[in-house]
Image: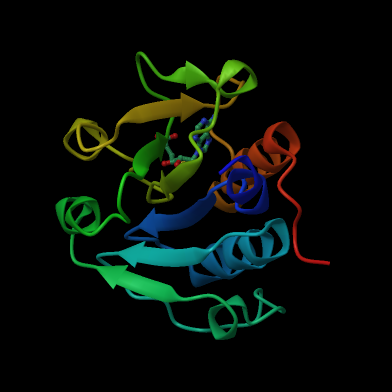
């Protein structure tokens, strides 16, 4: 039995996506980071992705890209035993530096103008926040969160 456990040990997986993005260039940049840093899937909520130039990796040709009609729809279709993690500057959000990433996580980023509001955040198991008093670009924020996960969990990105 111990041998089987060793053989099948792993660091789980993660997916990343954005709610109703305003700028396809940002999403392409996010997909590029997600692919390089080892995301298992990508998703959009409300607004669908239009392939364009900033994703030079064409990530959606290599990992599944899903679409959901709402955050509730996303939550209803999470992989088994997987936590939805909101990424937002919000009251009560956990600082990223001290955040322990769940083995199986789905990271949700907000719209560039409106972010994630309370209604969206209540679907999340946890909310994580980066340092600073002014928001970062959404693709930058998502890339930092994924890098933080990879660093802490020693997940091997694709070679
Ligand atoms: C440009 S921000 C949204 C703008 C924000 N609602 C505002 O009023 O300034 C877009 C998204 O990037 C992510 N984001 C940017 N800065 C962040 C930070 N410091 N901590 C966590 N998420 C951040 C969040 O997902 C946010 O919804």
Is the N terminus in the top left, top right, bottom left or bottom right quadrant? Answer: top right
Residue at the extreme front of the image, as rendered: 1
Q: Quadrant of the C terminus?
A: bottom right
Left or right of 87: which side holds 157?
Answer: right
State the residue lying farthest toward the right.
Answer: 159
The x, y position of residue 66, in whole percent, is 36, 72
**Could you say which is closer to the camera, residue 55 or residue 5?**
5
Residue 115 appears anywhere in the view: no
Q: Residue, x 36% and y 65% (percent of image)?
A: 44
In this figure, which colouring scheme has been used for the structure? rainbow
Task: Confirm whether residue 111 shows in the render.
Answer: yes
Q: From the viewer's side, name the closer residue of 85 and 134.
A: 85
Residue 150 position within the rendered picture, expressed as x and y whole percent measured from the top left:
70, 43
Q: Looking at the picture, how far across and down is residue 135, in whole percent?
A: 53, 33
Residue at x-position 51% and y-position 39%? 103
Q: Is residue 65 above or below residue 124?
A: below
Image side of residue 86 versus residue 139, left or right? left
For residue 17, which quarter of the picture?
bottom left
Q: Residue at x 48, y 66 (%)?
A: 41
Asked if 49 appears above or below 157 in the picture, the reply is: below
The one nearer the camera, 30 or 105, is 105
Residue lying at 54% horizontally and 79% vertically, measured from the top left:
60
Tag count: 0
The answer to whether 128 is drawn above or below residue 13 in the figure is: above
Residue 54 lies in quadrant: bottom right
């Amino acid at each position: 039995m111990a041998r089987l456990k060793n053989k099948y040990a792993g660091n789980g997986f993660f997916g990343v996506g954005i709610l109703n993005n305003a700028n396809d260039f940002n999403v392409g940049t996010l997909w590029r980071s997600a692919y390089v840093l080892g995301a298992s899937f990508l998703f959009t909520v409300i607004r669908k992705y239009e392939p364009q130039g900033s994703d030079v990796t064409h990530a959606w040709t290599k990992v599944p890209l899903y679409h959901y009609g709402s955050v509730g729809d996303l939550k209803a279709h999470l992989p088994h035993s997987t936590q939805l993690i909101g990424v937002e500057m919000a009251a009560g959000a956990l600082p990223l530096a001290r955040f322990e990433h769940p083995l199986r996580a789905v990271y949700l980023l907000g719209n560039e103008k409106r972010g994630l509001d309370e209604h969206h955040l209540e679907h999340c198991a946890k909310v994580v926040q980066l340092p600073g008093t002014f928001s970062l670009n959404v693709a930058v924020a998502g890339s930092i969160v994924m890098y933080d996960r990879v660093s802490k969990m020693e997940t091997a990105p694709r070679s």
